[in-house]
Image (tube, rainbow, N blue to C red):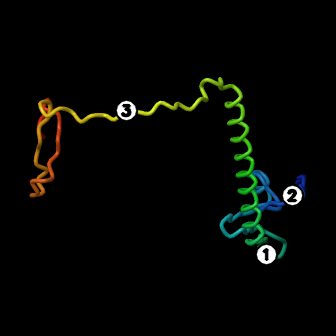
Amino acid sequence: MEFIKFEVADFESSYHAIFGRPALAKFMAVPHYLYLLLMMSGPNGVLSFRGDLKCSYDCDTEAVQIIARMQQAYEAQEIANIAQQTKPEDMEILTKKAGIIAPPSKTNTIEIDLGIGDPSKMAIISAHLSKE
């Protein structure tokens, strides 16, 4: 018999105990994380310790929600910092309207058939490009 000293922390988690490999080797324990099962040798045979799947799922869901809220707060703070560093003239919205772009002149373009059998559907490309 060998005594192993370890600390127990009382916190909500999907695992009530976290053992490292040395402790698992000393206990001769075999963990199965998918089934939340820990098996080890006992005085009268194999001891099986089972976890609560519902509790594990609830703890994991809550942890994901906490992290999501922390991430949102961090991103909001980052945006606020960038906004404070931005010059007021850089934040102005341009009011100038874009001009209408005229299609290229017919002399610099050629029409090619798209190969669908409809002569009304032609593609216009630059005369400097190959038809391929």
- Above or below — where is 42 with respect to 74? below
Q: Which residue is mark 3?
A: 99
Q: Residue at x 59, y 25 (%)?
A: 90
Q: Residues within 10 Å of mark 2 (few under 14, many from 20)?
A: few
User: Is 36 left, or right, of 107 in this rendering?
Assistant: right
The quadrant in which residue 118 appears is bottom left
Check disc 3 and give the amino acid type. Answer: Gly
| Along the line of sight, the residue nearer the viewer: 3 or 109 | 109
Q: Residue at x 82, y 70 (%)?
A: 42
Q: Residue 83 in the image: x percent, y percent?
A: 68, 31
Is the C-beta separation of discs 3 and 1 under 8 Å? Answer: no
Q: The residue tagged with tag 3: helix, strand or loop?
A: loop
Check disc 1 and give the amino acid type. Answer: Gly
Quarter of the figure that contains the C terminus: top left
Q: Which mark is residue 29?
A: none
Query: CA separation, marks 3 and 1?
Result: 85 Å
Q: Earlier in the sequence, mark 2 or mark 1?
A: 2
Q: The residue tagged with tag 1: helix, strand or loop?
A: strand
User: Is 79 left, or right, of 106 in this rendering?
Assistant: right
Q: Earlier in the sequence, mark 3 or mark 2?
A: 2
Query: CA separation, marks 2 and 1?
Result: 31 Å
Q: Which residue is mark 1?
A: 45
| Along the line of sight, the residue nearer the viewer: 50 or 111 | 111
Q: Which residue is mark 2?
A: 11
| Along the line of sight, the residue nearer the viewer: 29 or 89 | 89
Quarter of the figure that contains the N terminus: bottom right
